[in-house]
Amino acid sequence: MSEEEELPEQVEEVHTPEFFEQFISYQLQQQEVEKEKLRISEKEIDTSHEFALESLKAQSENQRQLWQHVSRDRNRNQWFIFILILLLIVILGVALFLDHKDVVFEILKMVALIGGGFGGGYAYAINRRKNSDNDENA
C-alpha cells in the first residue's frame, strides 16, 4: 500500500504550474521549429523549381543551336554533292560532244562502282548498328 500512497504524490508533483509552463514553452518551441522547417522546405521547393526552369531553358537553347549546326552541315553537304554531280554532267557532256564514248563509258563505270561501294558500305553500317542495338536490348 505504501507504493499506492506515493503514487498520488508523484502525480501531484508532475502537475505543478511550473510543469505546465515548461510544457507549453516546449510546445511553442516545437511549433517554431516546425514553422522553420516548413519555411526551409518551401524555399528548397522554390529553388528547385527555378533551377528546373533554367535547366529547361538551357536545354532548349542547346537543342536549337544543335539543330542549326546540323542544318548548316546538311546544307553544305547537299551543295557539295550538287556541284560534284553538275561537274560530272559537264565532263560527260564535253566528252560526248568531243565524241569520246570510251571515256564516257569508263566514267560511268567508275561512278557505278563507287556508288555501289558507298551503297553497300552504308547498308552494312545500318545493319551492323541495328544488330548491336538488338544485342544491347536483349
Image: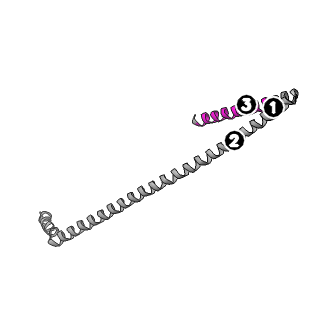
Q: Looking at the rendering, which quadrant does residue 70 occupy?
A: top right
Magenta stretch: residue 5 in it?
no
Which numbered dot is residue 79?
2
Residue lying at 69% horizontally and 31% vertically, measured from the top left:
123
Please state if 50 lies on the left or on the right of 20 as rendered: right
Marked residue nearer the N-terminal end (1 or 2)? 2
Tell which tag, 1 or 2, sits nearer the viewer.
1
**Magenta highlight: main SS:** helix
Residue 39 percent coordinates (x, y): 33, 62
- 40 and 55: which is toward the camera: 55
What residue occupies the far bottom of the structure in this picture?
18
- 128 and 101: which is toward the camera: 101
Does 68 appear above or below 100? below
Give the magenta range: 111-136
* Element at label 2: helix
Marked residue nearer the N-terminal end (1 or 3)? 1
Q: Looking at the rendering, which quadrant does residue 80 occupy?
A: top right
Amino acid at the residue labelled 3: Gly
Residue that label 3 marks? 120
